[in-house]
Image (spheres, rainbow, N blue to C red):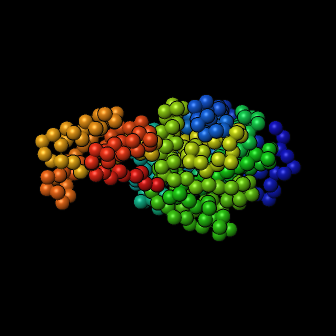
Amino acid sequence: MAPTTDTPTGLPVSIDDILAAAHRIKGGVAHTPCLRSDWLSPVVGMDLYLKREHRQRTGSFKERGARNALKRLAPEQKQHGVIAASAGNHALALAYHGQQLGIPVTVVMPTFAPMIKVANCAGFGADVLLHGDHIGDAKDHAMTLVAERGLTYINGYDHPDIIAGAGTIGLEMLDQVPDLDAVVVPVGGAGLIAGIGLAVKSIRPEVEVIGVEPRRASSYAPALAAGGPVKGEMLPTLADGLAVPVVGSNAFAIARKVVDRTVIVHEHDIALAILRLAEMEKAIVEGAGATGVAAVLGHMVDDLAGKRVGTVLCGGNIDTTMLGRIIQRGLAVDGRVCRFSAHISDRPGGLAGFTRVLAEEGVSVIDIAHDRVFGGDEIASVSVECKVETRDHAHIEALRQRLETEGFATTFHKQPN
């Protein structure tokens, strides 16, 4: 497709840069599928297409920008090598493609970085340095090594070559879904949405570009309100890959011109999206990668009903222990796991009568615990804390009503946002 005359001008990256990046990385980065989800589309009332970037060799879209940036280096820069601060995906992408291209790579990772990612980076031949309590400390240390060792620093979301590489996703999506009406893109440092948005708007300006941020880690929305990058409040989030305190200045300059609107998603929406993708699409996706689907499932873009909508599963590097916890949370959001407390008689047969009701209502007990000390004012009663498997929210409500009818005082716990 040829760019239209509506291509934004005066920006740090152009459509020509993205087209050149597509040619430059061809054969070195996977051309991932973008297929209609036959399972999710009927659920959300739109034709939902999933761009499966989690199937890249190192598990994320970051490979596109990494390879593009490395291949753009001058000969002396390639000889001395590059450095970056990253807690995961950018480090993995640089390490892998640096090894492929014969370019030395140093990555500075915070001390909390998952050990599997540290090991994988080292396995790809990178010099891995652990420094600091957070990514800011790691970056500060990396910048001192730029001068000391003569290395080239490559920002993982704001370097123009990184943004151009990310933009190749937009080119592919337009080719793969010719009648696309909208793209829903996760936003962290804004490099991904800047690249995709620029590619899409340059070729088909009528396609709507929608950004998605997690409620607990939003920096793009505050930047829009302030008119420039500012520090956003960062709280722990399932979409940890999007927890960038300040959006990139280059990325923001582009995104503000090509992004039509942004939406905010809750943690329970992200957990449910991870669960739905695992169950329905057989896709293991990290929180950041599932955020676009979370916006659709969370009814943040219901105005797109009946349209062709694409979103990017931008990463799949999720810790297995974290995956188990997130799936459990997703089941709770979905009404398939329920936790409640009840007061029952401490006389013989009291527990048997209680569990009989549970059995008759068709719930499966996961865990049950007695507490005689805090059982209430009635000395002959006991408090029980229950976690059970249910079918859905309607099943939970039926259980609550049945227990109430049988005379059990209960308190059902809600899933936090």
Percent across and percent down for residue 255 are: 70, 56
**Residue 109 visible (yes or no):** yes
State the image coordinates of residue 55 (x, y, percent, origin top left): 56, 34
The N terminus lies in quadrant: top right
128 relative position to 200: left or right: left
Between residue 326 and residue 193, name the one nearer to us: 326
Relative to the observer, which residue lies in front, 262 or 369?
Answer: 369
Quadrant of residue 281 within the rendered picture: top right
Q: Position of residue 30 (x, y in %)?
A: 62, 33
* Residue at 63% from the left image edge and 42% from the top image edge: 311
Left or right of 226, for residue 13: right
For the point 49% across and 61% down, which residue is it?
A: 234
Q: How many marks?
A: 0
Q: Residue at x 48, y 51 (%)?
A: 267
In the image, is residue 327 above or below residue 220? above
Residue extending furthest toward the right: 5
Q: Is residue 360 above or below residue 139?
A: above
**Side (left or right) of 406 relative to 261:** left
Which residue is depicted at the point 58% across and 37% down? 43
The quarter of the picture where residue 97 lies is top right
Kindly tell me whether residue 163 is visible in this rendering: no
Query: Looking at this view, is 57 or 34 the one in front?
Result: 34
Residue 261 in the image: x percent, y percent? 68, 55
> Toward which corner of the image does residue 33 lie, by quadrant?
top right
